[in-house]
Image: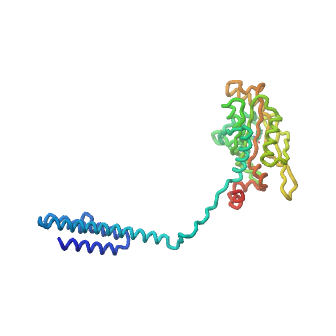
């Protein structure tokens, strides 16, 4: 025993020194310290050691176990350090880090945030509604007759269930009045969907920003003043804004708003950016009917509503000639806004 144990120790340390990877190191550990390992078996022989030698042999065993365990740990650390070094081969860690490209906001987000900011300062708060709408909120409650062209399958995306992708954000007007009571001053930015042919100025998914103001004595000059102020804030005080009489089923009178666009080297031209008008009393009546009260009594409250195309506003702001650039994710285009 007294010779056997140091021999096991010497051999084990030699094998540890030779181990080229973690697996062979583990083989050595199992072969020596494992259940059937050489040192473990030697320890089992303790029973047959004469009493007077037991202490000395026990000490040898302990020393061997400690030395071998330490040897394995040391080698493990050395192997790990070697592997780390190898992983860094060819990499100069003292070089300065490569600069990460900073992100930026999409032009649509920029113009939306700006529009919201101006209107919030004027006292409007945010409202929202679902993009998958029913015909009631998108059309009926907005005084839109059954045979109106916007309700046509050719113009609108319908689901088999009869629901549809909202064709405008005006449905949020209805959803707001169903639960809130006057005075109401809300804006609702969001997507709208139409089966339009896609070209330089049309997408089948576009972005609108709806506004609704209902209170006592809201008048047409309020509407005009609010929107003129808005467009002057957005595009500059010198920008020309014009209101053109138009028709919407849910407002009376109704207007379309044009903004005069002047791009260097181009003749100035009017671009349509929004629809608006005074809320039609028929809309209030439909709301009252649904609510079963008279809170929106057309004799007592009036209101104005507007809906603008955010994509158009972005096009005007930055002179973007093709609306499709807004959805193509071309980094060369988007970088200009970052
Ligand atoms: N919903 C109309 C459209 O999408 C715009 C509009 C909103 C007009 C509110 C009047 C009042 O064209």
Q: Which residue is drawn at 75% across and 51% down?
A: 314
Residue 245: which quarter of the image? top right
Residue 53: which quarter of the image? bottom left
Task: Pinpoint residue 229: horizontal percent, then vertical percent.
Answer: 80, 42
Quarter of the rendering occupied by the N terminus = bottom left
Q: Residue at x 33, y 74 (%)?
A: 17
Q: Quadrant of ligand 1?
A: top right
235 left or right of 53? right
Task: Pinpoint residue 107: horizontal percent, then vertical percent.
Answer: 71, 53
107 left or right of 12? right
Instruction: Residue 248: tell me if it is visible.
Output: yes
Quarter of the rendering occupied by the C terminus = bottom right
Instruction: Residue 151: tell me if it is visible.
Output: no
Q: Residue at x 18, y 67 (%)?
A: 57
Q: Is residue 183 above or below residue 226?
A: above
Task: Pinpoint residue 217: horizontal percent, then vertical percent.
Answer: 79, 29
Task: Pinpoint residue 333: horizontal percent, then vertical percent.
Answer: 71, 59
Color style of the picture: rainbow
Q: Please identify the residue farthest to the right as the structure is shown.
A: 267
Q: Which of 230 and 201 is in front in this view?
A: 230
78 left or right of 212? left
52 left or right of 140? left
């Amino acid at each position: 025993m007294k010779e056997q144990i140091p021999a096991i120790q010497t051999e084990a340390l030699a094998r540890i020194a030779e181990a080229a990877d973690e697996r062979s190191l583990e083989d050595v550990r199992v072969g020596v310290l494992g259940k059937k390992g050489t040192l473990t078996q030697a320890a089992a022989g303790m029973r047959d050691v004469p009493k007077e030698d037991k202490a000395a042999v026990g000490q040898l065993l302990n020393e061997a176990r400690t030395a071998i365990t330490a040897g394995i740990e040391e080698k493990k650390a050395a192997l790990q350090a070697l592997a780390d070094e190898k992983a860094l081969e060819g990499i100069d860690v003292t070089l300065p880090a490569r600069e990460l490209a900073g992100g930026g906001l999409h032009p649509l987000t920029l113009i939306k945030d700006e529009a919201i900011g101006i209107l919030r300062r004027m006292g409007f708060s945010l409202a929202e509604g679902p993009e998958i709408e029913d015909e009631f909120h998108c059309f009926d409650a907005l005084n839109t007759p059954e045979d109106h062209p916007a309700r046509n399958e050719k113009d609108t995306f319908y689901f088999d269930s009869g629901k549809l992708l909202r064709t405008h954000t005006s449905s949020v007007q209805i959803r707001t009045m169903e639960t809130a009571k006057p005075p109401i001053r809300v804006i609702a930015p969001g997507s709208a969907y139409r089966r339009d042919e896609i070209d330089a100025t049309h997408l089948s998914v576009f972005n609108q920003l709806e506004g609704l103001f209902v209170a006592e004595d809201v008048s047409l000059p309020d509407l005009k003043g609010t929107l003129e102020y808005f467009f002057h804030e957005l595009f500059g005080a010198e920008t020309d804004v014009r209101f053109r009489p138009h028709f919407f089923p849910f407002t009376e009178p109704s207007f379309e708003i044009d903004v005069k666009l002047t791009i260097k080297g181009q003749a100035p031209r009017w671009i349509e950016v929004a629809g608006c008008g005074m809320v039609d009393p028929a809309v209030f009546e439909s709301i009252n009917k649904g609510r079963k009260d008279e809170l929106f009594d057309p004799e007592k409250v009036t209101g104005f509503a507007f809906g603008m195309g955010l994509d158009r506003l972005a096009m005007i702001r930055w002179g973007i000639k093709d609306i499709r650039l807004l959805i193509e994710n071309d980094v060369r285009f988007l970088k200009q806004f970052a």
